[in-house]
Amino acid sequence: MSLPRIGSQLFINRGDSPEQAREWVDQMNTVGLRVIRLFMLWDLVESREGHWTWDVFDAVFDQAAKNDMGVVPTLWALTSPGWMRRVRSLQGIDDLTDKKFTDRAMDYVDRCVLRYANHPGLDSWIIWNEASLELVPEKKWQTQYRDFLSSYHGSIEEYNRLSYHQFESFDEVQIHEGELNDFWAPHIEQLDWARFNRSQLLYWMKVITERIRSNDPNHPIHVNPHALVSNYTKTGQEVWEEGKVVDFLGCSAHPVWHFTRFERKAWPQAIAMSTILMRSASKGQQFWLSELQAGPAIDSGLIYDTPTGDDFRVWLWTGIGTGADALVFWCFNDRNDGAEAGEWRLMGPAGGETKRSKVTTEVCEKLIQHNEWFENSQAKTPCAHILHSTPSRTFAYLAEEGPVENPRSQDSADDALCGAWTLLDDLGIEAGFVNEAKVKSLDPKQSPLLICPNVTCVEDKSLIAELHQYVEHGGTLIVDGAFASKDQNGWMLREQVFELEKLIGAKKTDQTCFREKTLIQGQNSYYEAFFMRNDFVPTEGTQVFATWEDGDPAGLCHSFGQGRVITIGTCFFQKYFVNQDPALLKEMLIMLDMDDLLPSLSFANQNLRSLRHSVLDSKKGDLHMFINDFSQRDVKLMVHVDGIVEFMDTEELKSVAKGEVFNVSLPSKGVLLLGFKENELV
């Protein structure tokens, strides 16, 4: 039987005993947890040079095996132990150009993997916690940087085309030491350093992954990217490339660190969005929510907050609703020192129950109760996708930091992504993600909607043609902002202008910005534009469905083949993230063919806040989760195909017909679980 598993980090402090570790494992088992994440800190297993101690970790593995629980060690190969006096804390990354150090780091990996590879308690490996690098330009990187430039740009002639300085070969290129935060610093140097930083992160991820596999080819390996709903370019992370390195991805999703651009009531959406990005970028079906805040963040985090038991219930069902194989808390017990000392714990200060742990047990028991529905359940193929544009996000990073209201902050591309995803989610549509490479594999029959929110930069020059083909075969494409204006190096896309005009069915005559309040007359009512105005001259057959106040076109619909392209002449999705304007929601509702996008059951009213709808594909049919982050309320559900609804908590069966509307009661801060079987499957 394979049910979604809930687990937690078990933090081993200096001085913790094997007896204490075994007690914690038994307590985790009592709560209902099935996964134990474990930091295999180099500083703990080699506390002084040549002195390797494993007794506490052995105790965790042995006790976990007795309880039929799985242990997930997280390796810390690039953080040298304290006795070396090379890094200031366990968060530090050592000098990766020092081969003597990196050789010792690989010895540490070998020792960890060989000790536990055949242990019955081992579940899987995490190569590096929240793997990230923030390299500063230094001469010691000169050789690797030149090699990267040669590989990325292909020829010195191409590099010279982009560079202010001119070179005979890459061997002449020099690193300019220090931060690259000068506004007038050449774009290509800033972009290349960000891409080099990313390449180094991927290199070391591959090195550690391959080292683990050489000693243990049997257990899966994953990594947990973090801060996924903001611009993580500076940390070197790139989930689409990371997903190719490891067996699967899992995310860290800590509201007090990662969701500060979201309102608190929207944190469940941020949890879902982060986890679904992992689902989209992983190799296969497996993905995790690998870290989720379990307790109070008082003195740690960018903001302070404590999840309530009700929050836990909503967050857990939100994660389960994405189809994640496991949801893992940070943390089960107290850390003894540091900023997080006494914080983040699931249990009480003395190890007793909390409202959070009781809710965790409640959810674990409900999964077992309804195991026939949850066993081997998986996410359904999304009907809608959003283009997650690495070149646009990398280019946006050159801007300054700023709040959500700042339209050109370094998070502008991510804010647009968040706006597009939350807007669809508010309409009851749970979207997935694609990068440029995956657009060509989209099947418009299965995924009839693709949104490109604020996709300013395009790297793959064939993307426009692939989007044209997607529409030709029946897809609806929605673009906004400065769509496809530049390439990945910030150069204007002059050669693709004709292709772009053919795609959107219009010529762009101007692109400007504004600071004063500016309105667009939409199909439903006026709504406020944001930051940018595009002026168009539509070609013959292109419909104008929205206008600026002066009457010029602001929204276009170009139909060709079996599909259509909708172009919105302002930063529509970024604006929705700013204030969730209901007028934008209504406008989008008119644009979409909702019948193609909704599952077997949906909300009859598409504007219900603090309410999420997830659907999993179960062996028994569609498994619907209506997650209510609000007080108890009655809502109407619409039926889209003939079938039978099973109310899981009461086992009541209800025969329903397409087009029928029926009432359900949603529990306060909880979930309504409904099974649905189409008539032909009953």
Image: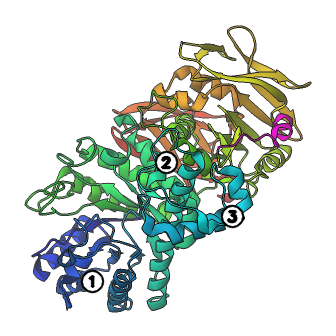
In which quadrant is the C terminus drawn?
A: bottom right
Q: Given the current orientation, which residue lies at the most extreme top position?
A: 550
Q: Image point 21% across, 74% down: which residue?
A: 25
Residue under numbered circle 2: 273
Disc 1 + disc 2, Cβ < 8 Å: no
Query: Residue drawn at (11%, 79%), measured in percent from left and top?
Result: 17
Q: Badge 2, how many Cα within 10 Å: few under 14, some, many 20+?
A: many
**Between discs 2 and 3, the one toward the N terminus:** 3
Q: Vertical placement of 394 versus 106: above or below?
A: above
Instruction: Determine the secondary structure under disc 2.
Output: helix
Three-letter amino acid code of the residue under disc 1: Phe
Residue beneath the point at 56% across and 52% down: 189
Please tell me whether mark 2 or mark 3 is closer to you in this view: 3
How many numbered marks does the figure carry? Answer: 3
Judged left or right of residue 440, residue 3 is left
Judging by the rendered image, the residue that carries numbered circle 1 is 61
Query: Which segment is the magenta one?
Result: 490-503
Alpha carbon distance from label 2 to label 3? 46 Å
Mark 1 → mark 2, Cα distance in angstroms: 33 Å
- Confirm or deny contact between disc 2 and disc 3 (CB under 8 A): no
